[in-house]
Image: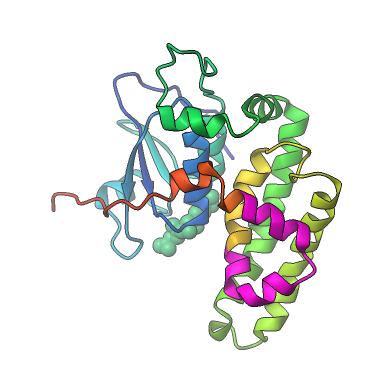
Amino acid sequence: MTQLFPQLDNQFKPILYSFRRCPYAMRARMALQLSSIQVEIRDIELKNKPPAMVALSPKATVPVLQLGENTVLDESLDIMLLALSHPIETLLPSDCATEPASIEIISTIDYQHLMARIQNLAQRNDDLALIAQNDNQFKPWLDKYKYADRFPEQTEGFYRQQGEQFITLLEARLSQHAFLSGAQLSLSDIAIFPFIRQFAHVNKAWFDQSPYLKVNAWLTALIDSPLFASIMVKRPVWQWVQ
Ligand SMILES: N[C@@H](CCC(=O)N[C@@H](CS)C(=O)NCC(=O)O)C(=O)O
């Protein structure tokens, strides 16, 4: 994270370029779903990226959030932090302008706790440190485990064992409390679980018989949550005029 957050432009409806199965895009979509920011989601194909997206963000990874003519966030964590700094302001009163679906989602989680933890600098940094471990250490092993045939210098089992170091750390945390950073859902749960979902699905039979019972239960609960269901809705690939 490199930048202060840009202001939202009331005249411009934000656009999120996204790929349904990308774990970085999933975490961004979940955070936006929990925020008051209404976005147009443009689902893309990684093999055929829209020129408009690449022009906005030449590094051309998803997610990309366009906030104005030339204002862009193209790192998933920046998008999460921007989103979660715009909470749904009035929690559930009858005149709330929020989508009913969002109300249903936030009523299933301790929304106030989630927001308070993000506003507390020390707690937020604690979450960010764990997320950095996920992104910088675990994710490279996850990629090799997923595509072990492309990295024949080691076996699939070797790559899995490397990834298990992080899973072991999560298991220890989840043995202390229901979520990664305490009794309630936090930024780290939302940011990390899409990657653990991928790890579990490389070999589900192995994962289900592994000793990581707490991680397995936590993962199942998050996959089954209304929040996750809401961001995994299938949409057609966004078409642009050539
Ligand atoms: N650090 C970036 C990483 C995003 C990323 O690597 N996304 C992948 C898809 S999961 C991507 O767009 N890769 C580019 C490609 O496959 O062409 C973030 O957190 O947003």
Quarter of the image for the N terminus: give it. Answer: top right
What residue is drawn where x is 47% and y is 57%?
22
Magenta part, dominant SS:
helix
Q: Nearer the viewer, residue 129 or 177?
A: 177
Task: Report the magenta residues as a range.
Answer: 198-221
What residue is drawn where x is 30% and y is 25%?
12
Q: Residue furthest left?
A: 242
Percent coordinates x, y for residue 128 in the rendering: 69, 42
Total label count? 0
Q: Is residue 94 above or below residue 45?
A: above
Percent coordinates x, y for residue 121 in the rendering: 73, 28
Q: Nearer the viewer, residue 181 or 61?
A: 181
**Residue 135 falls in which quadrant of the image?**
bottom right
Percent coordinates x, y for residue 71 in the rendering: 38, 32
Q: Nearer the viewer, residue 120 or 26?
A: 26
What residue is drawn where x is 56% and y is 42%?
77
Colouring style: rainbow
Percent coordinates x, y for residue 104 in the rendering: 50, 31
Q: Locate residue 126 relative to residue 144 in the image: left or right.
A: right
**Residue 134 falls in which quadrant of the image?**
bottom right
What residue is drawn where x is 36% and y is 61%?
46
Q: Locate residue 26 relative to residue 219 in the image: left or right.
A: left
Q: Is residue 137 above or below residue 241?
A: below
In magenta segment, residue 219: yes
In magenta segment, residue 126: no
Q: Is residue 20 above or below residue 140?
A: above
